[in-house]
Amino acid sequence: MPFAQPCRTGVGIFVVGPNAGVRMASVRIREAKEGDCGDILRLIRELAEFEKLLDQVKISEEALRADGFGENPFYHCLVAEILPAPGELQETCVVGYGLYYFTYSTWKGRSIYLEDIYVMPEYRGTGQGQGIGSRIIKTVAEVALDQGCSQFRLAVLDWNKRAMDLYKALGAQDLTEAEGWHSFCFEGEAMRELAGR
């Protein structure tokens, strides 16, 4: 099955920030629908390419559909879409996503984990908390509070200073700096060997 095509919107009309001299296209943050899986996969691949880890993407559109939209979804997802101005012939365009799931802290109880957040580069804001990425993060925070979560976690690569600066500006604490936590992963053969299979 072919991948979803990238957006074909007039990015020249989309400007963010308080000094934007051009009108801003309308942006909607909404829960993803099953039909968004092609766009979500496209954006996952773009994010992986940005992170220099594209070779690690093994997920398919079918797996995203089965895992996120069944009776007991493994994840939830928000999408950011650009809405055409009245009279424009263009369709809505998915330009970002935030994929999250619920976890549990033995110290603090209900938690939410933002696995991925990505906005296409041409639609990113100024890094001051007013752009699409910030709106996705704020929406995940609203979901967390609505579900009684006590914390909202995410991870970022150590070289992505722009993202780290944004998260700190929004009030996040860097747990590697503050508490020295490191993340570990059992995968593939190591996981099978651990399980004795």
Image (spheres, rainbow, N blue to C red):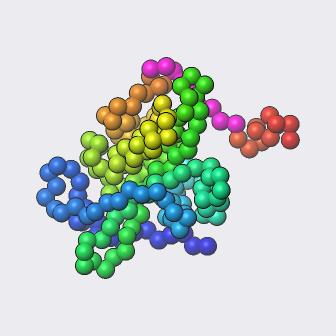
Residue 164 picture location, percent across and down = 38, 35
Q: In this view, does 196 lie to the left or right of 92?
A: right
Q: Quadrant of the N terminus?
A: bottom right
Q: Residue at x 80, y 40 (%)?
A: 192
Residue most extreme to the right: 197
- 159 and 111: which one is in front? 111
Residue 123 visible in the picture: yes
Q: Quadrant of the C terminus?
A: top right
Q: In this view, does 17 lie to the left or right of 81?
A: left
Residue bounds of the magenta highlight: 178-186
Magenta region includes residue 183 = yes
Q: Which residue is drawn at 34% across and 45% down?
A: 134
Q: Residue at x 17, y 49 (%)?
A: 18
Q: Is residue 51 visible to the viewer in this orientation of the structure?
A: no
The residue at the point 25 percent across, 79 percent down is: 87
Quadrant hosting residue 121 = bottom left
Task: Count how many numbered circles sit on residues in the image.
Answer: 0
Would you identify the image quadrant in which residue 25 lies?
A: bottom left
- The secondary structure that most of the magenta stretch takes on is loop
Q: Which of the 4 image quadrants contains residue 177?
A: top left
| Residue 88 pos. (x, y %) | 27, 77
Classify 185 as above or below 38.
above
Residue 55 vertical placement versus 13 (above, below): above
Q: Is residue 95 above or below residue 156?
A: below
Q: Where is residue 26 in the image (x, y as percent from the top left)?
A: 28, 63
Q: Where is residue 83 drawn, in percent x and y?
A: 32, 67
Query: Is residue 144 covered in magenta?
Result: no
Q: Which of 41 and 100 is in front in this view?
A: 100
